[in-house]
Image (spheres, rainbow, N blue to C red):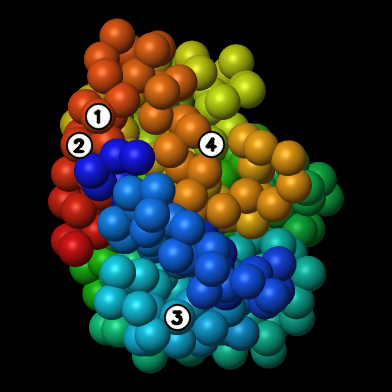
Amino acid sequence: MFSSIIDSHCHLDFPKFSKDRDEAISRAREAGVEAMINSGIDFKTNLSSLRLAEQYDFIYATAGLSPSVASTKDDERIGEVLKQLSELGEKVIGIGEAGLDYYHYKELGQRQKQKETFEKVIEIADGFGKPLIIHGRDAEDECFEMSKNLETVVFHCYGGSLETMEKIADAGHYISIPTLVCFSEHHQEIAKSVPQELMIIETDSPYLSPRKGRNEPAYLADSLEVIAKLRGITAEEVATITTKNTRKAFKI
Ligand SMILES: [Zn+2]
């Protein structure tokens, strides 16, 4: 167990945790996870994320509009979420996840829709002066170009190129390393070279588990040993560094 780690991105409000949400949260705390940042992706989860944060003082909420919502919902639905974000902005610690997903959406029209929507989400984050949490898949560079002038940007579950990562780092934005680092060589490359002061960690629970089955915040500990070995420091140092960075990025 570590003295303190923060899961900078998870979805504890998702149905995968319906049966054992409280237990999963207790297991996280026992594993040394002192805080968890729960990310909304659409109208419903923005509200459930906030509700969870109201329930636990060590859980923080962000509210977002995922690229899949932008690609698959009609203008009215998207407008509803945008309006919600501009109302919730003061209550959450960040805006996102939002961004571009060119891995799942290949059609030009869908991508165009994502870009238009993301542009509006960026404006909202900027207006509130809150960190923007980016979901960028096969579109990391474009996400960076669109958002680089914001004060604080967090690239959640970063899996882009090392070249783009360098640009992100030069702009002073954060790179979040997921528990995928336990088995993905590309994420290990990223974990090795990300500047120390911009490195944060996450599980993206219930996704991307380093163990069999569902991921949960308690498994964040698995990635510390891996990152430590890659960087030639101790796991406890990884914990201290990433906790400090996450607190700074999200002002928590
Ligand atoms: Zn997520």
Reading the image, the residue beneath label 2 is: 240
Callout 3 environment at 10 Å: few (<14), some (14 to 19), or many (20+)? some
Q: Are marks 3 and 2 in contact (CB under 8 Å)?
A: no
Q: Residues within 10 Å of mark 1 (few under 14, many from 20)?
A: some
Residue sitting at x 51%, y 38%: 178
* Contact (Cβ within 8 Å) of mark 1 with mark 2: yes
Question: Do the CB atoms of the residues marked 1 and 3 lie less than 8 Å apart?
Answer: no
Question: What amino acid type is highlighted by mark number 3?
Answer: Leu
Q: What residue type is labelled 4?
A: Thr
Rounded to the nearest angstrom, the CA distance separating label 1 from label 2 is: 6 Å
Q: Which structural element holds mark 1?
A: helix
Residue at (37, 58) in percent of width and height: 29
Mark before the other along the chain sequence, 1 or 3: 3
- Where does label 4 land, which residue? 179
Instruction: Name the residue tied to disc 3.
Output: 52
Q: Is mark 4 on a helix, strand or loop?
A: helix
Please name the residue that numbered disc 1 is placed on.
Answer: 236
Q: How much space separates mark 3 and mark 4, taking CA atoms?
A: 22 Å
Determine which quarter of the picture holds residue 63: bottom left
Q: Is residue 154 left or right of residue 76?
A: left
Type of amino acid under label 2: Thr
- Say which amino acid is labelled 1: Glu
